[in-house]
């Protein structure tokens, strides 16, 4: 039909920025759990043997390597969480912004770490020094498993700073994102004048 305008609303820029930050931070961890979920679905117990004839361990190792690329870079995690938080404040969602800044830097490395811990078995030891080898579902896991042992110390190191930053940014965001009562009063008065005219 000619002259037909597409009236569908486009998503706000703040929502797009927030979604991109979430995808970068949590996407690799989700991929790890998808591969681990395939192991659960196939009812393969953790061990050196193939998972129903598939070398599923190689996929888990590669997914973990990707997840550790994001999950062990503290500066990258905090910067992306801060951007996601500011995007929430721009969308007038201060509580979501505070939650993003507190939880995202913690959840990003913890999710792959938990996948490693539920995939261990007797004879598959992990340690921060990277000593020993672990073969899971036909693949040597190498450093991808040993990195999980370093995550608790890393989290204890940056969480106090992350919480302090979240508190400061949340206070600023709350003042900036809350509706201004005077602006609402002026808008209501203008509407009344318009209706009276």
Image: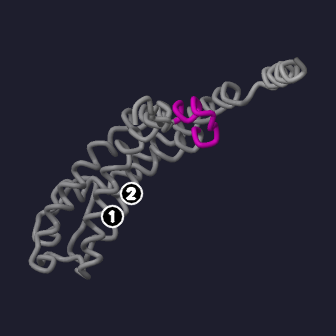
* Residue positioned 13% across, 62% down in the render: 58
Q: Position of residue 161 (x, y in %)?
A: 52, 35
Q: Position of residue 19 (x, y in %)?
A: 43, 41
- Near-viewer residue (84 or 141): 84
Coordinates of residue 72 in the picture (x, y in percent): 32, 43
Where's residue 143, x and y in %? 19, 54
Name which quarter of the figure residue 122 lies in. bottom left
Check the image and report above or below for 178 versus 22.
Answer: above
Which quadrant is home to the C terminus? top right
Q: Is residue 20 left or right of residue 142?
A: right
Looking at this view, is 141 or 177 the one in front?
177
**Gap in angstroms between the C-alphas marked 2 and 1:** 6 Å
Q: Is residue 48 above or below residue 169?
A: below
| Horizontal side of residue 75 vs 133, given as left or right | right
Give the total of numbered labels.
Answer: 2
Residue 96 among magenta residues: yes
Residue depicted at 28% across the width and 67% down the height: 36
Instruction: Indicate the colouring scheme.
Output: one colour
Residue 111: which numbered mark, if any?
A: 2
Looking at the rendering, the stretch of residues picked out in magenta corresponds to: 85-97
Q: Is residue 70 left or right of residue 177?
A: left
Residue at image x 11%, y 66%? 139
Instruction: Tell me which corner region of the image, top left, top right, bottom left or bottom right, holds residue 39.
Output: bottom left
Asked whether the beta carbons under mark 2 and mark 1 sit within 8 Å of each other, the answer is yes
Q: Main structural element of the magenta stretch: helix, strand or loop?
A: helix
Q: Residues within 10 Å of mark 2 (few under 14, many from 20)?
A: some
Given residues 89 and 101, the one toward you in this image is 89
Which residue is at the far front?
A: 2
Q: Which mark is residue 115?
A: 1
Residue beneath the point at 43% across and 36% down: 16
């Amino acid at each position: 039909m000619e002259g037909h305008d597409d009236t569908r609303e486009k998503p706000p820029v703040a929502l797009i920025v927030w979604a991109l930050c979430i995808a970068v931070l949590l996407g690799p961890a989700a991929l790890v759990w998808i591969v681990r979920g395939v192991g659960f679905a196939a009812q393969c117990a953790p061990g050196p043997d193939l998972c129903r004839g598939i070398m599923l361990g190689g996929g888990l190792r590669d997914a973990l390597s990707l997840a550790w690329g994001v999950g062990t870079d503290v500066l990258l995690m905090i910067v992306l969480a801060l951007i996601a938080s500011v995007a929430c404040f721009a969308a007038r969602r201060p509580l979501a912004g505070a939650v993003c800044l507190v939880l995202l830097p913690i959840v990003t490395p913890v999710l792959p770490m938990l996948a490693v811990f539920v995939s261990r078995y007797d004879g598959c030891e992990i340690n921060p020094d990277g000593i020993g080898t672990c073969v899971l579902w036909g693949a040597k896991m190498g450093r991808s498993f040993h990195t999980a042992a370093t995550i608790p110390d890393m989290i204890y190191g940056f969480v106090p700073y992350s919480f302090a930053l979240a508190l400061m940014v949340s206070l600023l965001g709350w003042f900036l994102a809350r509706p201004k009562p005077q602006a609402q009063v002026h808008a209501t008065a203008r509407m009344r004048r318009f209706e009276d005219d």
